[in-house]
Amino acid sequence: MPVLDDVPLEVSVVLGETTMPIHQLLRMGRGAVIELNQSEDDDVMILANNLPVARGKVSVYGSRIAIEVRELIRKPSIVAQI
């Protein structure tokens, strides 16, 4: 599959979200903790090129962090309307 070697793919994992004023964000220093709206037991969203593709669970193995894929998100089918 050498054709797929040149396809760019950015994979991201969304651990949670929060809202805060920009002035509060600018005052934060290195090591600051930002509280998110999810707990450690909630699933995380896995994005490929900023599109949701799966949900998963965060696992920690010693000093390594892994994401276990639990559910694939199917692309919605497009229904043509005439």
Image (cartoon, helix red, strand yellow):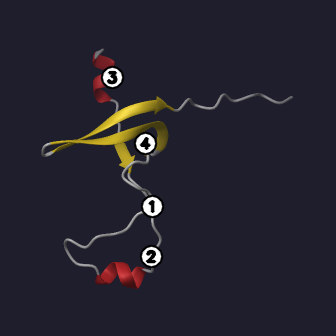
Tag 2 and tag 4, C-beta contact below 8 Å = no
Residue type for callout 1: Glu
Nearest to N terminus: mark 2 or mark 4: 2
Q: Nearer the viewer, residue 38 or 82?
A: 38
Q: Secondary structure at mark 1?
A: loop
The residue that appears at 47% across and 31% down in the rendered structure is 71
Residue 17, which numbered label? 1
Q: Quadrant of residue 69?
A: top left
Whether residues under marks 1 and 4 lie with C-beta atoms below 8 angstroms apart, the answer is no
Specify the quadrant that holds the C terminus: top right
From where the camera sits, is residue 46 visible?
yes
Q: Is residue 43 above or below residue 36?
A: above
3 vs 2, front mark: 2
Kindly report the distance in space between the C-alpha atoms of the residues bearing marks 1 and 3.
33 Å
Mark 3 vs 2, N-terminal side: 3
Residue 5 image-quadrant placement: top left
Out of 36 and 21, give the one closest to the viewer. Answer: 36
Lower sequence index among marks 1 and 3: 3
Which residue position is annotated with label 4?
47
| Label 1, residues with CA under 10 Å away: few <14, some 14-19, many ≥20 | few
Q: CA distance from mark 2 to mark 4?
A: 23 Å
Disc 2 marks a residue whose amino acid type is Met
Going by the image, does 51 lie left or right of 69? right
Residue 39 in the image, given as x and y percentages of width and height: 40, 55
- For residue 22, above or below residue 61: below
